Image (cartoon, rainbow, N blue to C red):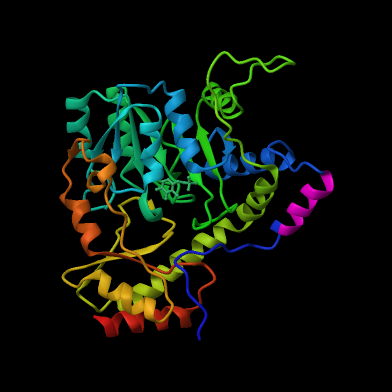
Amino acid sequence: MAEKIFLSPPHMGGSELRYVKEVFESNYIAPIGAFIDRFEASVAAYTGAKHALALSSGTAAIHLALRVAGVGRGDKVLASTFTFIGSVAPILYQGAEPVFIDSDESWNLDPHLLAEAIEKQKPKALIVTHLYGQSAKIAEIAAICENEGVVLIEDAAESLGALYRGRHTGTYGRFGIYSFNGNKIITTSGGGMLVGQGKEDIARAKKLSTQAREETLWYEHTELGYNYRMSNVLAAIGVGQMEVLPERIAKRREIFGWYRELLGDIEEIAWMPEVEGSRGNRWLTTLTFASADPMKIIRALAQESIESRPLWKPMHMQPLFKNAPVYGGMVSERLFAKGLCLPSGTALRKEDIEKITSIVRRAL
Ligand SMILES: *Cc1c(COP(=O)(O)O)cnc(C)c1O
């Protein structure tokens, strides 16, 4: 039996275990310690974000961004409908009301629908996702939010290292978030980072992430907080992973290139675009079929122990959000019906991609 090929498994660089050993030797096996500071500094330096806060997950980072932005019961929050649940569940944690916005030809949020939704809904914030590592039209989106006084939160969970006009995704908004879950481009097994331009915003998020403890010797609490800090052990893994991030992005882009080279002649296939002026990290190679059923391809690959998946099911189609308003919807519905994510792990070799593409070709 050939070894199973996963969609996007973890890929350690080389320094991670040494750093974790350092944590053990210092006995800082806690949510404090030198590696947390190093990991935050390294993500801030790499992305150009002014301030960074290491957290237990990307979802926690989005929740804190909403809290610090003052989003609460009855507030409306706009969000990309074509995204993963972690992006929008925190809207419900806050008792706020999600309003979903469809994608355009970029597969990411449609700025025209955004302008229309802001006018009608008077939202407090927008959560925009850069899906599959590809940048949304973020400068345009940021300008609309700025003009209308809407807080911009960028869900860059999948797009660490992706650029729009030379600037990192996650650094256009008042807040940006990255995820280090096991399937992301780099991982700490689980974890996230909140970044922001405002020193006070991030200081406030830090307080909320540590049970909102006041600065007294005893435990004094005047407001509700969370236990959302990252462990120093996981931050040590993160510091090691940051060292190989540029290599990982280059490899993901190379894998995308191999798929396109080997399947590019099939007119049935359209690839996720890279919007003009952007450079994605190609976290996952994703495509749509003009007429073929993606489930047929997924089953054919599964028979050879190869994992593949449909694209994200839009949030406005989820039973959890059956009462939430949606602007547009047909673009993401079609992407879900016709789309496919192919294995994109950075340890894959060209032979693996050749095997995968020959199965796809045969199944078609
Ligand atoms: C992974 C992911 C998240 C959530 O990150 P976690 O660290 O798993 O909580 C949010 N949004 C998107 C688009 C993601 O892919």
Q: Is 104 situated left or right of 19 in this image?
A: left
Quarter of the image holding residue 245? bottom right
Query: Which residue is drawn at the image coordinates 72% and 39% (left, top)?
Result: 30
Quarter of the image holding residue 292? bottom left
Provide residue 357's location: percent of width, then percent of height.
Answer: 35, 80
Q: Is residue 256 above or below residue 313?
A: below
Front residue of 228 and 101: 228
Provide residue 288's location: percent of width, then percent of height.
Answer: 25, 65
Quarter of the image holding residue 55? top right
Report the span colored magenta.
17-26
Query: Which residue is drawn at the image coordinates 26% and 52% (left, top)?
Result: 106
Counting the numbered discs, the total is 0
- Secondary structure, magenta segment, majority class: helix
Please tell me whether residue 303 belongs to the stretch shown in magenta. no
Q: Is 339 situated left or right of 236 in this image?
A: left
Front residue of 309 and 220: 220
Q: Residue furthest right?
A: 25
Query: Which residue is drawn at the image coordinates 16% and 43% (left, top)?
Result: 328
Q: Is 212 situated left or right of 309 in this image?
A: right
Front residue of 96 and 133: 96
Front residue of 65 and 279: 65
**The C terminus lies in which quarter of the figure?**
bottom left
Provide residue 134's location: percent of width, then percent of height.
Answer: 37, 53
Q: Is residue 289 above or below residue 34?
A: below
